[in-house]
Amino acid sequence: MDTWKAMLGNQVLVSAVVGWTVAQVLKTLIDFALNKSFNAERLVGSGGMPSSHSATVCGLTTAAGLKYGAGSFEFAISFILSMVVMYDAVGVRQETGKQARLLNSILLENPLKLSGEVLQQKLKEYVGHTPIQVFAGAVLGIILALVINNFPLEEPMSIFNYVNWFFMYSFLGYLLECIVLTIEYKKPVVDRGFGHGPFCIIYGFGAVGACLLLSPLSDHPVELYTASMTMATTMELITANVMIRLFGSFWWDYSHKPFNYRGIICLESSLAWGLLGLFFFYYLDGWVRTAVGYIPGRISAVMAVALTLFYLCDFFGASVCVLVCRKAEKMKNAKRQ
């Protein structure tokens, strides 16, 4: 347990691991958006946008520079490693991917009349990166390392507590949405999550973003209000556009409210997000952390794993259902025409 605590408190290691993880998730989502199908290999595979190799080494280098200084031995080693990895990604590895695509196309035509076993051995095409993919990964790694530098890694909360803390806010966000919409529509509203579970994870990510980005403003209410309003409104705008890209629609509508933009954001909700940010820092987060801290260690671990597995299954199941229904609707409309 002490080893795990030491590793979780190692800012340099955490920055590198988070850089790789976030990059892999982003490239999976981008691949899903482009190809309209989920490819699990993208979660661990190389190649694609953004470069997880670049995100990892740039997160490592940035964190080393912040912790030990630009004149340190640690920063020098990390910097040289980053240059080698990124040069290799756009050089040898990118050319390897190009050759693999060319050879696969030749094998598909089979002009040499090769045997079936040889033809079944398709070469891996996702190997290297384009310069823009490497640049995007590098920027992502640097930003994440800068954010993590302000994150209190030494707090007495385990990784399982943080997962439960995330889902607690997702659940509270779900309740908030249901209550507000029930009052507004004057009828019960209970279906506010993306899947079947009672979670709106945009609130969980909002809580994470608030802790990472807005904590330095917690002693300045006016700046905190403005930053909370801006961050939450930006999250709404980005989330809605991602959902439109993936599923053809988004799960809320402000078109009936004044000063709205395409029904995605509106002045009323933006002002409310600012107030919610103040409530989060001055009251709510202390209560939630205390409640999560009361959960015994083993129970906390089981809850965290169970909630994560449940939500992942729920999310991907709901995604498949939405895509299938959307495809069926397109086919139906095509037949009518």
Image (cartoon, grey):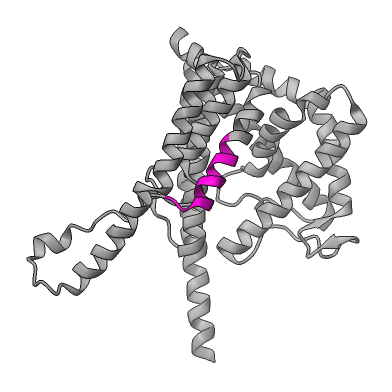
Residue at 53% of width from left, 33% of height from top?
58
State the residue in front, 129 or 70.
70
Task: Give the quadrant of residue 147.
Answer: top right
Residue at 43% of width from left, 61% of height from top?
37
- Name the outermost residue toward the top: 2
Magenta residues, start to end: 129-141
State the residue in front, 1 or 125.
125
Magenta stretch holds residue 295: no
In this rendering, the answer to whether 202 lies above or below 294 is: below
Task: Give the quadrant of residue 231.
Answer: top right
In this rendering, the answer to whether 93 lies above or below 125 is: above
> Where does residue 246 sit, x and y in percent of width and height?
56, 61
Task: Give the quadrant of residue 271.
Answer: top right
Magenta stretch holds residue 135: yes
State the residue in front, 207 or 9.
9
Residue at 70% of width from left, 40% of height from top?
173
